[in-house]
Amino acid sequence: MIKLIKAPSIVKAAGTKEKIIEEFFGRVNSNNSELSIAKMTSPEGWEEPGQKPEFDEYTVVLEGSLSVKTATNEYKVVAGQGILISKNEWVQYSSPYKGGAEYIAVCMPAFSPDSAHRDE
């Protein structure tokens, strides 16, 4: 199978400021529940609720810096670095640093709001 994605779908993001999610592959743009691939652009000061998702999330920072808090640590992930958060691990993403962050997120299985299990 060959499937050309001519443009991503813009997906509404959770968090304190407006973050842009451009989904290339996943439940919204390609009707795929096995995997999602999205480009995220989060402004300086953005923070999302913590979550304990049912998917593995692979994140690669392209520009800026991303803060990734887990139950045991906090990581500053800078451009050129990546981080893997395994399913069922509590995690909270934010971009508190100057200039925000641009990054790619790959989720297996594909991201869905229901499977993210965000904190109330």
Image (cartoon, rainbow, N blue to C red):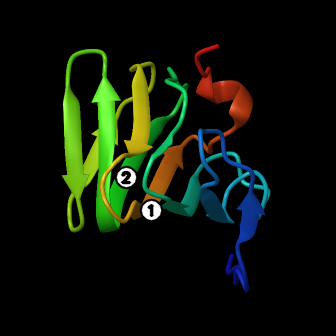
Identified at 31% across, 29% down, the residue is 69
Which residue matches tag 2?
A: 59
Location of residue 22 in the rendering, given as x and y in whole percent from the top left corner:
64, 66
Question: In the figure, residue 79 lies in which quadrant?
Answer: bottom left
Asked whether the residues under the numbered discs 1 and 2 touch, taking CB atoms below 8 Å apart as contact, a structural biologist would say yes
At a point 39% along the width and 61% down the height, the residue shown is: 101
The residue nearer to you, when weighing 14 against 98, is: 98
- Residue at 63%, 42% in the rendered image: 111
Precedes in sequence: disc 1 or disc 2: 2
Q: Left or right of 71: which side holds 105?
A: right
Relative to 26, 101 lies left or right: left
In the rendered view of the protein, which quadrant contains the N terminus?
bottom right
Q: Position of residue 21 (x, y in %)?
A: 63, 59
Residue 90 coordinates in the image, percent (x, y): 41, 19
Disc assigned to residue 53:
none
Q: Secondary structure at mark 2?
A: strand
Q: Amino acid at mark 2?
A: Thr
Between the residue at mark 1 and the residue at mark 2, the CA separation in whole angstroms equals 6 Å
Q: Position of residue 100 (x, y in %)?
A: 40, 60
Q: How many C-alpha atoms fall within 10 Å of the one at disc 1: few (<14), some, or many (≥20)?
A: some
What residue sits 74% from the left and 56% below the top?
11
Q: Quadrant of the C terminus?
A: top right
Q: Which of the numbered marks, if any, corresponds to residue 104?
A: 1
> Mark 2 Cα within 10 Å, few/some/many (few <14, many 20+)?
many
Residue 76 in the image: above or below residue 53: below
* Above or below, comparing residue 16 to residue 43 in the picture: above
Mark 1 element type: strand
